[in-house]
Image (tube, helix red, strand yellow):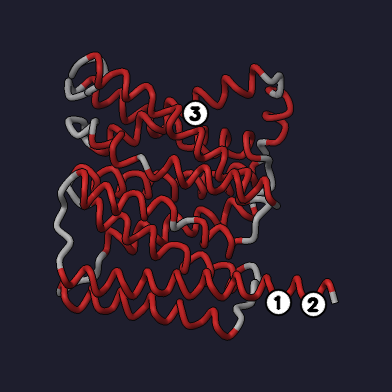
Amino acid sequence: MKKGVFYAASAYLLWGFFPIFFKALQAVPAIQVVGHRVVWSCLLLLLVVIIRRESIAFMRSATLRRILVYLGAGALLAVNWLIYVWAVNAGLIIETSLGYFISPLVSVLLGMIFLKERLRPWQWAPVGLAVVGVAYLTFNYGSLPWIALALASTFSLYGLVKKIAPLNSLHGLTLETATIFPIAMGFLLVEEARGVGAFAHIGAGTTLLLALTGVITAVPLLLFSMGARSVPLTTIGLLQYISPTMQFLFGVFLFGEPFTPVRVVGFSAIWLALLVFYAENYLNRRRELVTARA
């Protein structure tokens, strides 16, 4: 359990630095960046499987049913990546952070619906506060904060699939990237044939960063996968506040995105929801420890 929390927290910490990395790839279309993330991470993971001499075990584990499960996980991840990279390079880092602030509470609801993880009475309060915050932002924007909601829903669903997926962290992540590898590779080859491919054409620095997308993608995902399998989905949801906090701070103080009074009110409701949720979990654990000792 403690190792699982460490792995999950480490993944969220690394994800917190993503705005800096992807801002450096602003000259590359978001869909090409995602294509490179899929291709390079898949190749890296396959190399790890080969080095660990697990190739035969990996191929035997790839049954049709499992391929379909991990295809779903890979599709959710690719959509999440595309929305995120596009939003970061469009100067919407604060809205992406809102998505990942909402996501823990979406994870709680998914855990309740699909995994029968019951909410205690006081856990409903933060869910209600988050709904109020999103509703307030929606009313004042005049439209749904679709970027935030799309990021929250796709990543929470991905976490749910990873929670119930049958393979270990390495084989599962390798299979999910392999299922979408042909699509990503085919797209990049088409872009190259059209003469609009970025790899090896924009500059050595950009080419190197595109190749490194494999490392910066695979490492936190492996950590997340190891954590998600051994930690309750409600705890995963709680840890997730690490990366959006970092991204929010980068958006405001490093990239100078506006933080309007409307956003202050809406975000404050969501932050208060997280605070209440964290406090309720802490107090409940204290009560359980006292009961166990008695």
Q: Amino acid at mark 3?
A: Cys
Q: Which residue is mark 3?
A: 42
Q: Amino acid at mark 2?
A: Thr
Question: Contact, CB < 8 Å: mark 1 with mark 2?
Answer: yes
Query: What's the distance in space between the residues labelled 1 and 3, CA to CA?
Result: 45 Å
At x 45%, y 44%, the residue is: 13
Expressed as whole percent of the image width and height from the top left, the position of residue 222 reads 56, 38
Q: Which residue is mark 1?
A: 287
Q: Is residue 254 left or right of residue 43?
A: left
Expressed as whole percent of the image width and height from the top left, the position of residue 265 reads 24, 74
- Of mark 1 and mark 3, the one earlier in the sequence is 3
At x 25%, y 78%, the residue is: 136
At x 41%, y 61%, the residue is: 153
Question: Contact, CB < 8 Å: mark 1 with mark 3?
Answer: no
* Mark carried by residue 291: 2
Front residue of 289/274: it is 289
Residues packed near mark 1 inside 10 Å, few (<14), some (14 to 19) or many (20 plus): few
Expressed as whole percent of the image width and height from the top left, the position of residue 47 reads 57, 19
- Of mark 2 and mark 3, the one earlier in the sequence is 3
Residues packed near mark 2 inside 10 Å, few (<14), some (14 to 19) or many (20 plus): few
At x 52%, y 56%, the residue is: 239
Q: Quadrant of residue 7?
A: top right
Query: Does dot 1 land on a helix, a strand or a loop?
Result: helix
Q: Nearer the viewer, mark 2 or mark 3?
A: 2
Q: Nearer the viewer, mark 1 or mark 3?
A: 1
Query: What's the distance in space between the residues labelled 1 and 2, CA to CA?
Result: 6 Å
Q: Amino acid at mark 1?
A: Arg
Q: Is residue 236 left or right of residue 126?
A: right
Q: Is residue 8 left or right of residue 97?
A: right
Q: Quadrant of residue 89?
A: top left
